[in-house]
Every structure is written in C-alpha cells, then in structure tokens.
Image: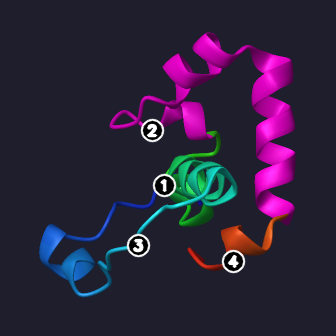
Amino acid sequence: SADRQPPSPAHRLHRLREVVITVEERYWAALVYVLNNPVKHGYVKLWQEWPYSSAAEWLDAMGREAALGIWSTAIRSPAYKLFD
C-alpha cells in the first residue's frame, strides 16, 4: 500500500553500490529508476508525490510528452535492468 514507511537509513546502506554512467541510455535508465523507486516499494502511488524527489520539477522542465518518451524508452532499455 502507499502508506508504507521507508526503511531506516542503516537498512538501506547495505544495498548501495556505485555505478559509472558513461552513455546517455544508462543515464536516463538510472534517472527513471530513481524516480520510480518510491512507487515500486509502495511508499507513494505516484512518483511525483515522494517529498524527497525532484520528479515534479523534472516533469515540468522536460514537458509531459518528452518525459513520457524518455520514461517509456528507459524502462524497456537493457540498461534499466542493471539498476533493478
């Protein structure tokens, strides 16, 4: 449900890893992954609702059509699976 509480910072630290982004496809895949993560884990229903995210600002800056194009391309990209 969307009312789940995020795990403690200590709980999250064990999953951190560094990923070098060298190509644009991987950049967009990483961005989409980060923006969607609170939804995936059930903390919010829409990624724009996550209070610690700049997702709403990104959507405003990119424009809805451009953002949807990036989003749909990124989630189908093999690079996206590297982050999941």
- Image spot of residue 43 (x, y percent): 48, 54
Mark nearest the camera among 2 and 1 is 2
Describe the element under mark 1 as helix, strand or loop. loop
For the residue pair 5 and 37, the one nearer the viewer reads as: 37
Residue ID at (78%, 39%): 70
For disc 2, the marked residue is: 50
Tell me: residue 78, above or below residue 41. below
Type of amino acid at the residue the image marks with label 2: Trp
Residue ID at (85%, 50%): 73
Describe the element under mark 4 as helix, strand or loop. helix
Quadrant of image for the N terminus: bottom right
Query: Which residue in the rendered view is the most extreme toward the bottom?
Result: 14
How far apart are the alpha carbons under marks 3 and 1?
24 Å
For disc 4, the marked residue is: 81
Say the numbered circle drawn on residue 19.
3
Q: What is the span of residues highlighted in magenta in the rendered image?
A: 47-76
How far apart are the alpha carbons under marks 2 and 1?
8 Å
Mark nearest the camera among 2 and 3 is 3
For residue 21, side relative to residue 74 (left or right): left
Say the numbered circle drawn on residue 43.
1
Residue ID at (57%, 52%): 27
Whether tag 2 and tag 1 are in contact, CB under 8 A, the answer is: yes
Residue 1 magenta: no
For the residue pair 36 and 79, the one nearer the viewer reads as: 79
